[in-house]
Amino acid sequence: MIVVLKGGASERQIGDLTAWLKGLRVEARLVKGEQSAILGLVGDTTSVDIELLQAMDIVESVKRIQEPYKNANRKFHPDDTVIDVSGVKLGGSHFQIIAGPCSVESPEQICEVARRVKAAGATMLRGGAFKPRTSPYAFQGLRAEGMEMLLEAKRVTGMPIVTEIMNLSHLSLFEQVDVIQVGARNMQNFEMLKELGGTQKPILLKRGLANTMEELLMSAEYIMAGGNKNVILCERGIRTFETYTRNTLDISAVPLLKELSHLPVVVDPSHATGIARMVRPMSLASVAAGADALIIEVHNDPANALCDGAQSLTPDAFDALAKDIAPLLPLVGKTL
């Protein structure tokens, strides 16, 4: 349920209303927008007398909502959420490019790629220390050692880092990580999501390869219900009957998620297609669709990459792509 407040509502009046609702065992969350303020009611609202609520002096209107996700719902939070990632703002009019290798392979590799993508215009560095792989015989990442290399690249370049967590037992290793990524395979690892809800670090939540929009938003709700409102949604392609590409990039998910939720939306064209030459057109399409950021795989030697070389851009190709993206941003109300 959403209660839209009148413009002249005082802090005392809002406090009295919130206390009354609390007495009914309903939590009221105040959200102040540019034009109005609303109270989002969370809990069993059947005990709330809507007619009595509407009759109150400070209440403009009362609306019931049907969606099961409350915190992530744009109806609860009309304005776009802007997330501060160690000084880099993501969401609203702020567009960012996250780039780096699929896996951290050596100190030289990650630092070289970090310098190149930063020079080209990337504002955050991605890199995997722990890698979920379909085959148990594939490269699984350098784990704690890889994390140290990633942090060294952060110290060298000053770029915030984004890396994936696979197990809550590793959480202590993520203290200096700026954005914790929850991969597609863990999107519905609800125990992990609840634990991450107890942190205040930004969480990049990737859509599962066979999950609906509502399921993605409900996973975000798990994190937000735990108290962490810094959630970033990521569309990374879904599994369809098509086998030519690794996955099928759901471009329509971008405007749909922006309509349903106030959370920033990132697109991963690298995992979505699995083909390096497809990354550029899918990146441009994502920008045009309204994405708040791109997360792109870049490797200094894709042919010899230990993981996902086929979908990784070279630093030169990434530099050219960043130049192509820049002119599109003003057309969709974004700045880099």
Image (cartoon, rainbow, N blue to C red):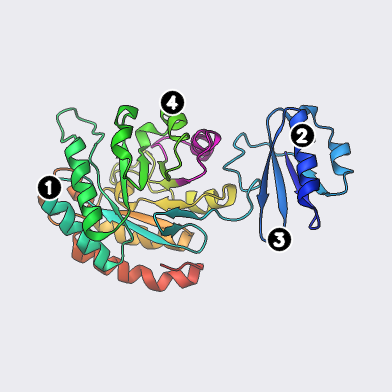
- Identify the residue at horizontal 71%, vertical 27% (top origin): 44
| Label 4 crowd (10 A; few <14 / some 14-19 / many >=20) | few
Of callouts 3 and 4, the N-terminal one:
3
Residue at the front extreme, as displayed: 12
Q: Which residue is mark 4?
A: 191
Task: Estimate the spatial distance between the alpha carbons at disc 1 and disc 2, rounded to whole Å.
Answer: 56 Å
Residue 207 appears in the picture as rendered: yes
Where disc 4 sits, the SS reads helix
Where disc 3 sits, the SS reads loop
Of callouts 1 and 4, the N-terminal one:
1
Of callouts 2 and 3, the N-terminal one:
2
Check if mark 3's residue and mark 4's residue have beta carbons within 8 Å.
Answer: no
Vertical placement of residue 196 versus 256, above or below: above
Task: Estimate the spatial distance between the alpha carbons at disc 1 and disc 4, rounded to whole Å.
Answer: 32 Å
Task: Estimate the spatial distance between the alpha carbons at disc 2 and disc 4, rounded to whole Å.
Answer: 30 Å
Residue range in magenta is: 207-232
